[in-house]
Amino acid sequence: MDRELADYVPVKNEEELARRLQDDRVVVLFADHFGSGRWTTALRLLTTLPSQPRTLRRIRREPGDAFSTEGIRGHKRTGWILDLRDPDDSIPATCDFGLELRHTADLDADDSHLVVLISTRLWHQIGHGAGHLAHTPTPPAQTTLFAALLQSAGIEHAKDFATDHRLTEQLTNLRPGQVKEHAQALIRAERHYRSATGRGTDPESPGFEAVVAAAANATSGWMDVLATWHSHPQRTSYDRNYLLLTAVYGGEPIDSVHTKIASLSQAFDEKEPAGARPKGQQGPGLIQLARQIEADPLPDGRLRFPGPGFAEAVVRYFWRDRPELITPFTRWTAKLCLDLGKKQGTQLAERMIPWALHDLQASRSTKLLRQVADDWAQEDALAPHAHDLIVAAILDPQTTQLVKNAADRWTGQPDTSPPLLRTLAHVFQTLTPAQPARMLRRLGTLASSQKPGVADAVGEALNTLFSSEKLRPQVRQTLDSWFTSTDQALQHAAASAFVHLAAQRDQAGLPALLHASNAEAAPWVIRGWRTTLEAEKPSPTAHHACAVWLDAATTRPDTERILTTLVRSVHDVAGHDLRGQRYLNLVRMAERWLIRHGTTHHHDREHVHTMLMHRTMQADPHRSQDREDASTGD
């Protein structure tokens, strides 16, 4: 919170907004565009209410779902934020949103407050009857905000920079978020200059002029500088590819520079001799190439570019200048991530994610996205970046539906690789808190895959989600439906998740699931053990979970509940299918547990083992029927 508000400058109507929030319990902040200051204003209002501190919570809901204040009932002294800024967000007109906001009895009872962040368009559609609650934050003067941001960063002569006419002209009509971007550009330029020269940036000094010029170039994306460089009459394709290559590497050392330039040239389908390495001393050397792009070669092999943001600006310039080459460039860079060592490869993959998103936005095709994600998913070091790439693409407003539809197709296509499917399980897990019902359904579809490790990945995802108190009821309901499904893959995924949960201990070291209910294990826990026991053979995790429960049974107070749960998981079901399999697997797990620690507490362990086996045999309905038949002589 401190970081979010470190650079905050009060909006002009902050006092009025604070008074409204305190009196009405609800304030709606609406504006036309991102960067209007709604988020930081909301944080400021909620963190400066009288009688601090209080808990801040962000309301999560499915896009398009209605909102009800009943959902926030019971959380004392809470500052709620309902964020509806996404351009694709909506709320049904029939939900009477304005009337809902006026019902503040629950907020009053809990001493809580609610701030709604919304676009002007959506507010006009659904805000009927609550106009008195809605306000647009009036941002501070651009120069005032600009100076405050520079001072907060510790920039010397911040006021001189903030009043320089060349900079103030650029600030006119900018939103607060855009002013912050300009301030960050100048901060980076000032630090870059000091680091490169060791000189100061006093007013009217060469350093001051250099920083102002670099900041202006950075905020314009270095467009004029790059256009001038590219249009030089002596410029060759070899030079341009070298500039792009150094930008891809971010100024880091490049092994076999000329070979990689040739590789990039080949990716662009350039003909000889443009892509060939000049022999001998015919072509430019590394120092000449560096000087041509106005970069300083450093002793450790790195390059220092002309100013902040230059490397990313080169890539953006390339996208606009050569749009037909975006896809081959992205494909070539993705392969480079695999070819480089772990450290450089992962660094490049992280930088490449927005480049791949740019290709996706431009092409409206997910073919390359899948190829990149699939290649990265095969490598342990790059698999997290494959996850991040898909998540970013789903969250991007321009590509969200495109990628969601593609991910649904990938889960059902026979040629999708197991590593990509496992990555998708992690993706759906990550997105579940924002869209629980939808992502749990997608995990269910993914669990149907027969490919190696996929069901286990789904199980691990559900296990992680179960740790969230808010999501636990939905995850439990999902697992319970999978336990009784006729789809064996769903049962496998549910069992995989369940045994991870069953192995968890509470603070006393006892099975956490066992104590989730008061009297005895909940029916869904029994169904979980039953599904686990119906596997062909127990997994290592299942053995571990059973050991946790039987260890707890030796403490005596929990013996009855544990034995009852395990016995019922074998026999408490209509019909006799798989009862023998369940019994066999329980015997296997109990015997491994018995011999696991040798003589440690051997007497207690033998006693629990004997009781479990005896009670399981006694509860067998076949045995009861045999005794009845013997007594009647049948």
Image (spheres, rainbow, N blue to C red):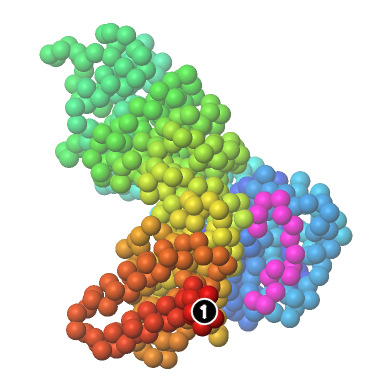
Q: Nearer the viewer, residue 474 or 106?
A: 474
Q: Is residue 265 visible?
A: yes
Instruction: Give the dominant element type of the magenta stretch: helix, strand or loop.
Output: loop
Residue 203: x %, y % from top left: 41, 46
Horizontal placement of 475 versus 463: left or right? right
Q: Which amino acid is tagged 1?
A: Gly
- Give the quarter of the image for residue 290: top left
The stretch of residues the image draws in magenta is: 61-75
- Residue 152 falls inside the magenta stretch: no
Q: Nearer the viewer, residue 613 or 461?
A: 613
Residue at 34% from the left image edge and 20% from the top image edge: 267
Q: Kindly give the residue lying farthest to the left in the view shown.
A: 280
Camera-nearest residue between 576 and 113: 576
- In this figure, which residue is indicated by the disc labeled 1? 633
416 shown above or below 574: above
Taking the view exactly as shown, the residue that stands out farthest to the bottom is 557
Does residue 439 show up?
no
Q: Which residue: 71% across, 54% down?
A: 65
The quadrant in which residue 246 appears is top left
Q: Where 558 sits versus 531, above or below?
A: below
